[in-house]
Image (cartoon, rainbow, N blue to C red):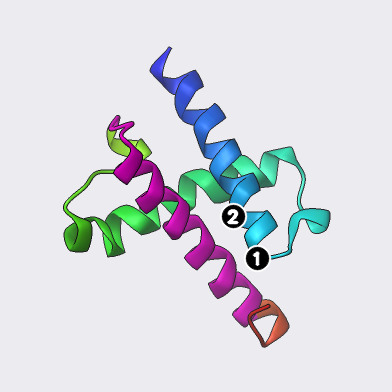
Amino acid sequence: MNFIIWIVIGGILGWLASLVMKTDAQQGVLLNVVVGIVGALLGGWLLSPLFGAGTINTDDFSVLSLGVSFLGAVILLAIVNLVFRGRVR
């Protein structure tokens, strides 16, 4: 059951990050889930030590962990935009 919640929350976070970065029209549901989960991994690696919170990948569903996962997804989309488009939107 945790795995299903992890995918749903990852999809929502990926979708919200794509809205912030204005890449929502180019992404589908599957890519939103991937961005949310990989962004949470990136956020756990970069931002968790700064904020002292886990991410959705560590089964920590607090408000702070959702914020760290969301920021990780936004950072991931910024890196992808920079690499493939040469600029961050």
Q: Which residue is located at x 29 percent, y 64 percent?
A: 46
Q: Residues within 10 Å of mark 2 (few under 14, many from 20)?
A: many
Separation (CA) of disc 2 from disc 1: 6 Å
Magenta part mainly helix, strand or loop? helix
What kind of element bears circle 2?
helix
Q: Which three-letter amino acid code belongs to the residue tagged 1?
A: Met
Task: Give the residue pinned by disc 2.
Answer: 17
Residue lying furthest top in this view?
1
Q: Position of residue 77 (x, y in %)?
A: 58, 65
Magenta region: which residues?
Answer: 59-83
Q: Which residue is mark 1?
A: 21
Q: Are marks 2 and 1 in contact (CB under 8 Å)?
A: yes
For the point 76% across and 55% down, which residue is it?
24
How far from the left and from the top, in percent, is residue 37?
A: 48, 44
Residue 67: in magenta span: yes
Nearer to me, 23 or 30: 23
